[in-house]
Amino acid sequence: MKKAQLLTTIFLLIALVGIQTVSAQFGNRFGRQRSTVPQSQTPPPEPEPITAEGVVNEQMPSIIETLELNAFEEAVVRTTLTKYVQKKLELQILQLEPQKMKEEYEKLGKLQNEEMKAGLPPDKYEAYLELEKNRFKPTKKKKKKKKKNKE
């Protein structure tokens, strides 16, 4: 009887070790085992920083259309705007105190307007100031439709 118990115990130990071995080799079927290394997600690409040329290129079509600029005037406006937009972007990078930032923006605005006044004819300069006040969005003039009297 002791031999039967001993054989049964040995058989169970061999079966237990065999099951462990097979489980370790073929665990989670077809090699799909859970990884202990966390999978990293790729971060979304950072948006490209806006440039002075990009800002000016967005505004130029409405400026050219509204002010009816010729090639020389367009070049003057484009270079002046690019120059001062670049300076304003540099000020933003510096992150000055709000009061100091406001003062610097006002100085840059005055210098920009002086350059525009020197480079544009008076009527186009006044139209530019109006356009700047509207944040470079062209104002559409509404044409009144004449009603025909039917008699």
Image (tube, grey):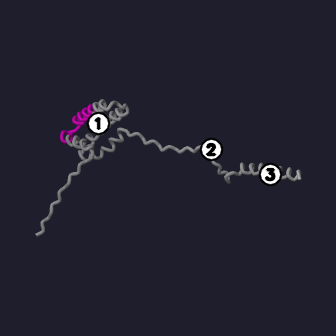
Going from the N terminus, do you reach mark 2 or mark 1 first?
A: 2
Q: Amino acid at mark 3?
A: Leu
> What residue is rendered at 26% in x and 33% in y?
106
**Does 60 appear in magenta?**
no
Q: Which residues are magenta?
A: 106-125
Q: Which mark is residue 36?
A: 2
> What residue is rendered at 17% in x and 59% in y?
145
**Left or right: 90, with 117 as reference point:** right
Which sits in the foreground, 107 or 143? 107
Q: Residues within 10 Å of mark 1 (few under 14, many from 20)?
A: some
Identify residue for label 3: 12
Which sits in the foreground, 97 or 11? 11
Q: Position of residue 134 (x, y in %)?
A: 25, 44
Which sits in the foreground, 98 or 137? 98
Q: Amino acid at mark 2?
A: Thr
**Left or right: 44, with 17 as reference point:** left
* Quadrant (top left/top right/bottom left/bottom right) for the C terminus: bottom left
